[in-house]
Amino acid sequence: MKILRSSIFHTPANAFTTPTALVSWDDGALAVEAGKIAACGDFATVRAAHPDAEVRDLRDGFILPGFIDTHIHFPQVRIVGGLGYSLLDWLDQLTLPEEARLADPAYARTIASEFVQNLAAHGTTTALVFGAHFADATATLFEVAAAKGLRVISGLVLSDRLLRPELLQTPEVAYRESRRLIEGIRGNPRLGYAVIPRFALSAGEPMLEVCQTLLREEPEALFTTHINENPREIEEVAASFRWAEDYLAVYEWFGLISRRAVLAHDVHVTDAQLHRLARAKASIAHCPCSNAALGSGIFPLRRHLDNGVRVALGTDVGGGIGFGMMKEALQAYLLQRVAPDPVTLSAGQLLYLATRAGAEALNMSDKTGDFSPGKSADFNYLQPPVRDRRFGLSEILTLADASWVKEVYVEGDLVHDHG
């Protein structure tokens, strides 16, 4: 057993429903044994309970749970910073041409390596990732993530219409290649599979039927896609599926909305959709940086919370502005301050959104997301450049960036060392 002595912050409960969810110790201890959290609390108490454990003194920094990114695109690493576009123009002019390049295996490996390294360097220990439109590139992502030791849930991105021809698959090929990828990661506890139609606009009814079949065959798989991000997108989906009541109804018709669904954005959502999302226990990946960068709008957080819809955070690289989940949390705070129906987010709620809320969305709250005993030892050691002042959680979330992230652990294994 090893005891890490440091200031510690975590949220072992829902910070929107439990006022005391944020738990912290100025002089805290995180006891780790065999990749699990053995204890977390005041240093004197934990030390007294484990007098023979090795102690590492990290009091010049802070320990936070590993960050959990619930929406990010692996093929888009190199288009971060494409400003001045709205969603569909950004897709056509920047994103889809870049994603087509991943047909080249060598380029796909380069991008996978950059992507995984950036996740780790920013303290993201678990991510729900849009893979590539190419099975071999998506397999490369899984391979690189496994070698790094991160938790990654991903899958082949499925589209059969309205995109560049090289990004399309037939439903038969989509099913066959998805099955190959699923079997390729089976048995690796840090990898998971997600069924991922790009969005309803580019996935016709036969492809959505493939998604339905895969989810029936794989009860542990997640479902993720986009919804209600941009008004023009919503209009075009309505024109493509005239039989559907609304955007959400397209996915509902094929049985895709359940506790296993994580839907990105949901900026322009109706009250009727919110009721149905809550009833299905689906989750929303809120991507505030992307919503602002692409001019999509301000996320109606209060309406989601009031309707009991689960919300976590996603960086949405490359529509977003980087891999930093602390920056994403800060942007969520800033935009909610000026939202039409504002929510003043506390530091505890921001940490919850970046950690445990993600674990809940991914059905992994029994494994990770906070420091409850028995959970995986997934954590970050952050060290500020200024050592002679005290930092509270709100200051950390406001000021910290990747340079503060010194060490990152998954199941007690060091996966990133900033030196």
Image (cartoon, grey):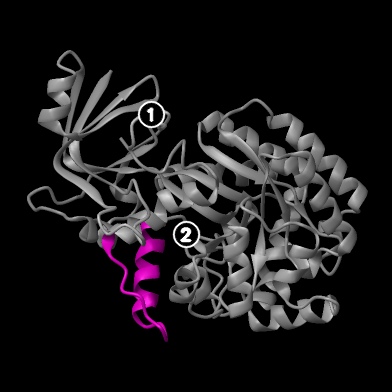
Q: Is residue 214 above or below residue 309?
A: above
State the image coordinates of residue 320 (x, y, percent, origin top left): 51, 65
Give the residue drawn at x 86%, y 60%.
160
404 within the magenta span: no
For label 1, the residue is 374
Q: Is residue 375 above or below residue 265?
A: above
Q: Which mark is residue 313?
A: 2
- Between 394 and 11, the one lying in front of the other is 11
The image quarter in which residue 108 lies: top right
**179 vs 270, nearest the viewer:** 270
Crowding around mark 1 (Cα neighbors within 10 Å: few <14, some 14 to 19, many 20+) is: some
Report the side of 416 relative to 146 (left or right): left
Q: Amino acid at mark 1?
A: Gly
Taking the view exactly as shown, the residue that stands out farthest to the front is 279
Give x and y (percent) for residue 211: 79, 52
Give the CA separation, mark 2 to mark 1.
Answer: 24 Å
* Magenta stretch, residue numbers: 326-347
Q: Is residue 400 left or right of residue 197?
A: left
Percent across and percent down for residue 285 are: 54, 61
372 relative position to 206: left or right: left
